[in-house]
Each structure stands twice: as C-alpha cells, then as structure tokens.
Image: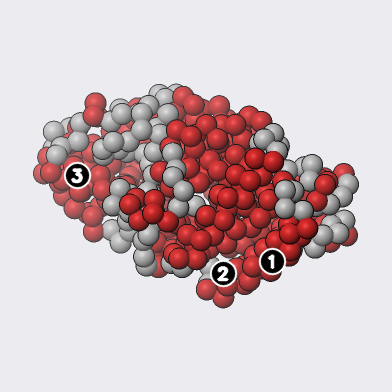
C-alpha cells in the first residue's frame, strides 16, 4: 500500500512496484481456509489447491503456482476464486520488471468484474463475513494498482472501501483474524506517509495509527490462517526498515528463509538482521549462500543481483569494523552497476563516505557523498549522503532498535 504515497514519475512506479508485488501477494492470501458459508471453499480440495498455490508464490515458483490455481476452476462454483488467483499469479510474474500500462489495465478490469460479482452476492447476504473479506481484498488490490499509476481519486475511494469491508468482516465475525492483516497494512502504511501529505490523506481516509497497525499485523502473524506467513513477512520488512527492531526481526528472518529458500529477498533480509545484531559468522554464511546461488543461477538469483551482493558484503564488513575489506566490496559494487539496482550504487558511495568520515578523511568522505548524490535514483542512501555532506558521520549516532526520527542507515535492504 505504499503506492498510495502521492509521488510521481516512472521511477516511482518502478520503485513502488517491487513493494506492491509483496503486498499484492498478501492481499491474495487473505482468503482464509473456512469460507464454506459463502461457498468460496466448497471442500477440502479447494483449501489444498489454494494453500499449495500461495506457498509456491511466496517461494516464487510461478509455474507451480499457476498449475495449482488452474485446478480451482474444477472445484470453485462461485466463479470468484479461480479468476482472482489466476490474475494474481500473472501479476506476480511481473515483479522482475516494471509492468506495462496494458498489463495493469487488464488486472484492474479483472478486479472490477470480480468486485461486481461479489457485491451482487453480498446484496443477498449483507452480513456474510466471507464475502466481506473477499471484497476487502479485491478493493485493496484495485487501490494498489490505482496508486501505482497515479489514479489517486480512484485509489482513495478503493482504500475506503477496503477498510470498510475488513471492519465489517470483523464486526460480524471477530475471530476472522486474517482480516487484521489488511487492516494492519492500512494502519501502519498510512501512518508513515510524509507529514506534508497527512492533512489531505486524513480528510479523505479514516484515521490510521502506527501502534495499532503493528498490533494488527502481530495478531495476523500469530492467529491468522492463510495470512500468517504474509503477516510475518510484513513484520520482517517493517522491523528491518522503519522500526529498526532487529531483535524482533531475527526469528522472523530465520523462519521465513527456512520456509521459502527460493526467495532472494529473504536472504538479503536475513544477512542484514545478523549483521545489525553483530552476529557476523551467520551474516557471512548467508552471504556465502547468496554467492553460491548467484554462481549456479539457482532459484531467482541472477547476475544482475551481483552488485547488490557486493554491497551487502561491504556492509557486513563495515559493521564488523573491517574497513579495508568493506571498501573493496563497495568498489566492486560501483564497478559493476545494474540499472535496476541503482539504489545499491548510491548506498555503496554513501557508505564509502561514512568509512572515510570514521577514518577522519573528511575530504574523501564529502567527495563520496557527492558521487552518491549524482546517481540517478532516489531513496534513503541519497538522503543520508545529503545529510552527511554537511554533518560528518559518526557511528555512535546510528540507532538500531528504535523508530527512525532522523537520518538512519537501513530502511532499505542491503
């Protein structure tokens, strides 16, 4: 839902697209395994098919996921589940590149058709929690794509519908814990919107709350059925990002990496957590596994990720205090840039500047920060470079276990 931020341009669409793919998968699995009253889950076969398909998607096994979802047409009598899951499987395949407008329009058209069908059914059973949950999910999916493409009025309307359906679902069935996942994303994400947008957002949308969002995500991670793993993933990204609570992130990183070993993002998240906690042998072991996967071309590790790997290794050695080794990895990052990972290049330059500052080499530090600012990207690395260009970096100023209130290092994965 971070796509709801009011930002513009092709870069923003590409940047938030990667985020929204993860959140889209969360919306996908909001359907819990006991929707029998709405006939969305007619028997155990449906539950088995969807459980298998969603696990494959989390592991980025798209072919296996599509094969699983294809079997839904034979067991789903509502006409809702099969096209919904098929649309999301197609959407998730696009996360390695920026989608075209035609592809997004096709997804929106599919969501509008499903919303119309589900709302027609809801008129016959207005208090049915299963349909309310499905509609919250479908409207949330539409809001996500509207936000990516700058359709803000449509996105705001869809967000309001999303929250109202999730709230109504819990009103009629308080134990439908999976709905807390969607509400947690709503509350936390909207509470993080830049302060200068908040008055406009609060006029258009129900109030959000950061602490409530974390509580809701925690409920889903502990008591949800279909959303448990997705809530854990959302919490991992939150704790390693804005919250900087790496102690809470550690068990999540360990569990998710064991369960979904084909998902490269989880390796980088785990390495970050271990490094921040000073557990360098474990961090370096994750790095070794990443390098092995890159060399073998296993899973979804591609050569394009190599500079990201170098930058991550540089950060581990920087955290460890081995600055010469860290600098060698950061220079390798810069020497092998990848357009998709321009933000990694910016991080390498910024962290080179930080090391120069720690070594008392202010002129070299400032030159490195200027190089970071020259990279054609956006994000926290350039924000830090701009800050430390005027204020020398000091290691002791970095807070690692509290929400960010000023310049911070790790709101993006290494």
Q: Check whether the beta carbons of the residues at disc 2 and disc 1 lie within 8 A of each other.
A: no
Q: Nearer the viewer, residue 156 or 102?
A: 156
Q: Is residue 408 visible?
A: yes
- Residue at the image point whose x is 53% and y is 68% from the top: 99
**Drawn side of residue 363 relative to residue 276, left or right:** left
SS state under label 3? helix
Give the image location of residue 383, x and y in percent.
Answer: 26, 48
**Which of the two residues, 408 or 164, is positioned nearer the viewer here?**
164
Question: Which of the two marks, 2 or 3, is nearer to us in this view?
Answer: 2
SS at badge 1? helix
Assign the C terminus to one quadrant of the image: top left
Decide: is 7 above or below 222: below
Mark 2: which secondary structure? Answer: helix
Image location of residue 3, percent across then percent down: 45, 57
Neighbour tally class for label 3: few under 14, some 14-19, many 20 plus, Cα within 10 Å: some
Left/right placement of residue 278 relative to residue 30 reads left
- Residue under pointer 2: 104
Residue 387: image tag: 3
Q: Residue at x 44, y 64 (%)?
A: 152
Image quarter for residue 105? bottom right
Which one is nearer the viewer's eye here, 275 or 306?
275
Marks 2 and 3 close (CB-CB < 8 Å): no
**Mark 1 burial class by Cα count in 10 Å: few <14, some 14-19, many 20+:** few
Mark nearest the camera among 1 and 3 is 1
For disc 1, the marked residue is 116
The residue under the point 67% across, 63% down is 115
């Amino acid at each position: 839902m971070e796509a709801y931020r009011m930002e513009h341009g092709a870069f923003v669409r590409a940047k938030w697209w990667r985020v929204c793919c993860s959140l889209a998968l969360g919306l996908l699995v909001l359907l819990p395994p006991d929707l029998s009253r709405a006939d969305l889950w007619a028997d155990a076969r449906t539950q088995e098919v969807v459980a298998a398909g969603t696990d494959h998607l989390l592991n980025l096994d798209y072919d296996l996921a599509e094969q699983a979802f294809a079997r839904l047409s034979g067991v789903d009598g509502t006409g809702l589940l099969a096209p919904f899951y098929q649309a999301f499987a197609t959407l998730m395949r696009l996360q390695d590149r920026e989608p075209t407008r035609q592809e997004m329009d096709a997804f929106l058209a599919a969501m509008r058709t499903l919303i119309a069908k589900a709302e027609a059914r809801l008129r016959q059973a207005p208090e049915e929690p299963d349909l309310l949950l499905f509609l919250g999910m479908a409207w949330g999916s539409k809001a996500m794509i509207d936000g990516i493409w700058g359709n803000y009025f449509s996105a705001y309307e869809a967000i309001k519908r999303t929250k109202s359906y999730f709230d109504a679902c819990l009103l009629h069935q308080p134990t439908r814990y999976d709905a807390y996942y969607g509400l947690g994303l709503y509350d936390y994400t909207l509470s993080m919107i830049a302060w200068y947008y908040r008055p406009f957002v609060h006029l258009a949308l129900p109030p959000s709350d950061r602490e409530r969002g974390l509580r809701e995500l925690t409920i889903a991670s502990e008591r949800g059925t279909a959303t448990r793993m997705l809530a854990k993933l959302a919490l991992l990204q939150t704790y390693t990002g804005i919250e900087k609570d790496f102690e809470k992130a550690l068990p999540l990183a360990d569990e998710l990496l064991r369960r979904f070993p084909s998902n490269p993002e989880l390796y980088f998240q785990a390495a970050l957590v271990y490094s921040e906690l000073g557990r360098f042998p474990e961090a370096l072991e994750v790095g070794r596994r990443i390098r092995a996967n890159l060399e073998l071309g296993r899973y979804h590790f591609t050569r394009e990720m190599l500079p990201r790997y170098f930058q991550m290794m540089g950060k581990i050695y920087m955290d460890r205090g081995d600055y010469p080794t860290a600098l060698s990895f950061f220079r390798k990052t810069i020497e092998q840039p990848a357009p998709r990972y321009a933000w990694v290049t910016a991080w390498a330059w910024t962290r080179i500047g930080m090391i120069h500052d720690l070594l008392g080499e202010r002129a070299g530090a400032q030159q490195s920060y200027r190089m970071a600012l020259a990279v054609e990207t956006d994000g926290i690395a350039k924000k830090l470079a701009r800050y430390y260009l005027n204020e020398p970096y000091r290691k002791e100023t970095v807070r690692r276990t509290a929400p960010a209130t000023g310049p911070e290092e790790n709101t993006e994965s290494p």
